[in-house]
């Protein structure tokens, strides 16, 4: 018999699970990756995960056999790179979310690419095995996760993963996918510069406006942030997703390879030697690489044009943030290993007119900030009570007539954000509308990045310009976009979450999502039935209303025909077969199309008579309405 | 706008309130299509000038509503948080910008849609634009052109203010606000030149 003493407060009976899982921050870098965690001392710490180092080279080697032990990640893989240049993938981040047709993928690199049907980059490695960039990145993440688990003695499930602020939607989706493949619950994708500012903001408790200049192995990012009242507000971001220290290495390697034959192996050796020389030259004035003497001045001459490419995006971001030319800026934070190069620091000093901050190791600062964010998101009492407000890096829009890009959400809009725009049909009886989603700043669609294409079907056939489709963009807190198109009259709608057009193949996604597919099929059937029933109700109601108001436009035979079809549709809507309902809807549309047109004509006539012509914006009129308008003017 | 009941505790919540005063749960935003006072979203009274303390209000509300604050909450609350933050961000963007703010003030008074622009104004705009294109092609400095348009914008803004605050012709104010949009676009274009992407 239970006694009073056995009754406990709800929740108290289960002692809280001891802290056996941990949320981490991961910097998935082009050249190196890191994992960090906020420990009991309230401070973020980067974990030593590769031969005693916190930096894990983002290098994956695919060895013989394809068994579990055949994949090597980190320094071990890097040592194998020169001998097995084609089986060892370096700087895979450059290929994330990119198509094999991208100029980026065809630059100096030793890999064998598989011919892909879908334009996906796929590497052919040892024994003909084929891997895609998401899978390669997942190997890096898995290595970080398992090695951190060993060090901590805890399970690592949840992670904040950083991405360059300038990453587009496809690249973000690919990164999230890699996290999932590695068995991580990705709490948040965090922009790298924002993470860096978060790491800095801790000690400084400061307020003011800061620039984060982030030059990593493969990407350049510039962010302008304002810190105040515990809120980090990103004011503007910019950058170049294909510019970084690797390019410095390539530029110097070109010098080293001058006039020599270029086997994959030679290329790999030259790049490695160039990288070493570049690092040496941060300390000394001259060094040797592949038997050639290289001075700092030579290096600087080779990379100067590359460094100067960071100037444009930086000035643009300063202007977007309302601090043109850096006037009113309180500090510049350096992030990324490439900011160790003296010529880069000199350029930053010139560009912003002040000495940059580099108190925290520029290689670790991003991972440390990500760990802080992971702690913020998962702890009941986070160590640092701050909030990050991030922005969209690029404008998001739609293709409109004539191949123009119409922007719905402008770059540097604080997220989450939403925007809606209405479009009308341009042909009589048009029942479908193609929705093409693009990302970028250019006027023409062809110059921007294409994110997705889909078709909204089931628009009721009306005269041109009368069916209205509202397209809504919603960007979530990870910066990932979903698009909904909805026809306003019937409520027919369709939603897509933008997935990488150049990421995983459909079979790969299918393989991963096999389990959930049966459910999805049922869901689709159920939704189609509901959609069609709702549509039937609306159309019947509209038809009744029109018969009452404008029935005089019909002959008795015509009226009879419409009423018969309405009865048939009512009958169908009682049933459970959405195809039957849909067919009856179409029939009713068909028999009443002429009636609808007459009703519209009458409506337009009335409107035009009731108003002065000047009140009409002709640009809004459909060709059909325009015809009516012209006819009236001639009277 | 009518008050609603909290989905969690059933208490009364004012339409503009994002959080239930009784239980502290985040509420769903008003239905799409309802007229929303974006000043009220920020807890501010409508005004032509930027309201004092706008940035503070935005930061305070962001700290309460942002999805990062609800990473451990129920899916329903997380969804409301995302929606409310979206509404908040949009309200802040509108109230922060002089042209959007003026447009919204007029919308709150029932003046909506694109007003018809006078042919004289459109002609003037075309001329300004041609000059801009010419200057760009020949690499002339754009400062003088920008200054002229900036001056027009400021003058227009003052005129709108006068109409709004002294119960003048709101339809006329709407046309002036539409003009300001043209000026803003023009100035964007001028400034876009100084830095290449």
Image: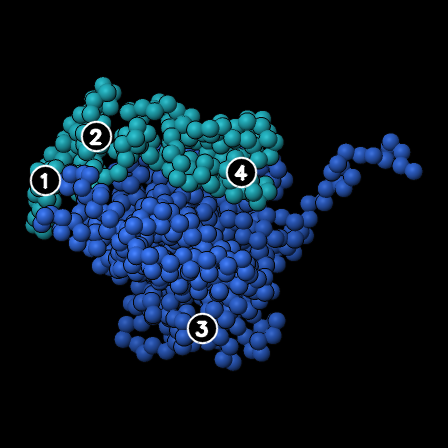
Chain colours: A blue, B cyan
Instruction: Report which residue position mark 4 lands on.
Output: B69
Q: Give the CA separation, mark 3 to mark 2.
A: 63 Å
Residue B171 is labelled as 2
Residues behind callouts 1 and 3 on a single chain: no
- Determine whether the residue tagged by mark 2 lies in a helix, strand or loop: helix
Contact between labelled residues 4 and 3, with CB atoms less than 8 Å apart: no
Q: Give the CA separation, mark 3 to mark 4.
A: 41 Å
Q: Give the CA separation, mark 1 to mark 3.
A: 60 Å
Q: Position of residue A76 (x, y in %)?
A: 54, 66
Q: Of the residues under marks 1 and 2, which one precedes in the sequence?
A: 1
| Nearer mark to the viewer, of 3 and 4 | 4
Q: Position of residue A406 (x, y in %)?
A: 28, 51
Q: Give the CA separation, mark 2 to mark 4.
A: 43 Å
Which residue in the rendered view is the most extreme toward the bottom? Answer: A127
Residue A385 is labelled as none
Query: How many numbered tags mark residues here?
Result: 4
Subunit bearing disc 2: B
- Determine whether the residue tagged by mark 3 lies in a helix, strand or loop: strand
Instruction: Report which residue position mark 1 lands on.
Output: B119
Name the quadrant containing residue A289: bottom left
The residue nearer to you, when weighing A470 against A510, is A470
Contact between labelled residues 2 and 3, with CB atoms less than 8 Å apart: no
Residue A69 appearing in the image: yes
The residue nearer to you, when weighing A365 against A568, is A568
Is residue A87 left or right of A516 when viewed as pictured?
left
Instruction: Report which residue position mark 3 lands on.
Output: A123
Which residue in the rendered view is the most extreme toward the top? Answer: B166
At x 15%, y 27%, the residue is: B155
Q: Give the CA separation, mark 4 to mark 1.
A: 51 Å
| Nearer mark to the viewer, of 4 and 1 | 1
Q: Of the residues under marks 4 and 1, which one precedes in the sequence?
A: 4
């Amino acid at each position: 018999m239970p006694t009073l003493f056995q009754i406990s407060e709800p929740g108290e009976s289960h002692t809280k699970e001891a802290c056996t899982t941990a949320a981490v921050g991961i910097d998935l870098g082009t050249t190196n990756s890191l994992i960090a965690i906020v420990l009991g001392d309230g401070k973020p710490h980067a974990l030593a995960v590769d031969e005693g180092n916190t930096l894990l080279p983002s290098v994956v080697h695919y060895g013989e056999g394809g068994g579990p032990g055949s994949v090597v990640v980190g320094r071990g893989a890097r040592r194998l790179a020169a001998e097995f240049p084609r089986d060892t993938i370096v700087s895979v981040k450059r290929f994330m979310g990119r198509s094999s047709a991208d100029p980026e993928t065809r630059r100096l690199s030793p890999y064998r690419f598989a011919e892909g049907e879908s334009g996906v980059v796929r590497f052919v490695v040892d024994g003909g095995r084929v891997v895609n960039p998401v899978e390669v990145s997942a190997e890096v993440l898995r290595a970080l996760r398992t090695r951190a688990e060993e060090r901590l003695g805890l399970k690592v499930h949840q992670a904040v993963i950083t991405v360059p602020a300038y990453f587009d939607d496809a690249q973000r989706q690919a990164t999230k996918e890699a996290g999932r493949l590695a068995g991580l619950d990705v709490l948040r994708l965090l922009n790298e510069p924002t993470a860096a500012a978060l790491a800095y903001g801790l000690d400084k408790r400061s307020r003011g406006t800061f620039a984060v200049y982030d030059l990593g192995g493969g990407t350049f990012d510039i962010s302008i942030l304002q810190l105040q009242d515990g809120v980090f507000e990103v004011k503007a971001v910019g950058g170049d997703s294909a510019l970084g220290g690797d390019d410095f290495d390539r530029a110097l390697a070109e010098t080293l390879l001058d006039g020599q034959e270029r086997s994959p192996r030679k290329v790999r050796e030259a790049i490695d030697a160039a990288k070493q020389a570049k690092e040496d030259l941060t300390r000394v004035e001259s060094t040797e690489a592949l038997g050639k003497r290289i001075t700092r001045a030579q290096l600087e001459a080779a990379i100067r044009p590359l460094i100067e490419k960071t100037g444009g995006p930086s000035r643009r971001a300063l202007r977007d943030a309302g601090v043109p030319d850096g006037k009113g800026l309180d500090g510049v934070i350096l992030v990324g290993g490439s900011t160790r190069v003296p010529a880069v620091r000199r350029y930053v000093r010139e560009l912003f007119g002040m000495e940059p901050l580099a108190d925290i190791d520029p290689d670790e600062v991003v991972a440390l900030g990500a760990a802080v964010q992971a702690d913020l998101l998962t702890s009941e009492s986070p160590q640092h009570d701050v909030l990050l407000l991030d922005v969209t890096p690029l404008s998001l829009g739609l293709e409109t007539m004539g191949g123009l890009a119409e922007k719905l959400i402008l770059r540097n809009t604080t997220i989450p954000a939403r925007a809606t725009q209405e479009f009308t049909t341009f042909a009589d009886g048009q029942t479908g509308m193609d929705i093409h989603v693009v990302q970028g700043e250019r006027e023409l669609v062809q110059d921007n990045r294409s994110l997705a294409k889909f078709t909204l079907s089931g628009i009721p056939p009306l005269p041109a310009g009368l069916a209205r489709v509202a397209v809504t963009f919603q960007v979530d807190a990870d910066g990932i976009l979903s698009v909904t198109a909805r026809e306003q009259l019937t409520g027919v709608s369709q939603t897509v979450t933008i997935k990488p057009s150049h990421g995983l193949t459909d079979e790969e996604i299918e393989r991963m999502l096999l389990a959930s597919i049966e459910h999805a099929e049922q869901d689709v059937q159920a939704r189609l039935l509901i959609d069609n029933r709702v549509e039937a109700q609306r159309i019947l109601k509209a038809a009744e209303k029109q018969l009452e108001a404008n029935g005089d436009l019909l002959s008795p035979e015509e009226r009879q025909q419409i009423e018969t079809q309405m009865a048939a549709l009512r009958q169908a809507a009682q049933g459970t077969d959405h195809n039957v309902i849909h067919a009856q809807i179409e029939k009713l549309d068909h028999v009443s199309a002429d009636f609808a047109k007459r009703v519209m004509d009458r409506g337009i006539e009335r409107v035009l008579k009731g108003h002065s012509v000047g009140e009409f914006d002709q640009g809004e009129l459909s060709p059909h309405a325009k015809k009516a308008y012209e006819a009236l003017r001639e009277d | 706008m009518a008050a609603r009941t909290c989905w969690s505790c059933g208490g009364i919540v004012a339409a503009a309130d994002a959080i239930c005063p009784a239980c502290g749960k985040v509420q769903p935003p008003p239905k799409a299509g309802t007229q929303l006072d974006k000043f009220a979203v920020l807890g501010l009274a409508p005004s032509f000038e930027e309201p004092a303390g706008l940035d503070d209000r935005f930061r305070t509300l962001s700290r309460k509503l942002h999805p990062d604050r609800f990473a451990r909450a129920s899916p329903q609350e997380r969804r409301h948080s995302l929606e409310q933050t979206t509404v908040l961000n949009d309200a802040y963007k509108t109230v922060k910008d002089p042209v959007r703010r003026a447009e919204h003030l007029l919308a709150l008074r029932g003046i909506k849609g694109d007003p018809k622009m006078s042919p004289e104004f459109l002609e003037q705009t075309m001329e300004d634009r041609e000059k801009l294109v010419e200057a760009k092609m020949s690499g002339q400095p754009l400062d003088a052109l920008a200054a002229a348009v900036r001056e027009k914008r400021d003058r227009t803004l003052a005129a709108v203010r006068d109409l709004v605050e002294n119960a003048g012709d709101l339809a006329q104010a709407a046309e002036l606000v539409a003009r300001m949009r043209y000026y803003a676009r023009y100035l964007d274009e001028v400034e876009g030149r100084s830095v290449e992407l």
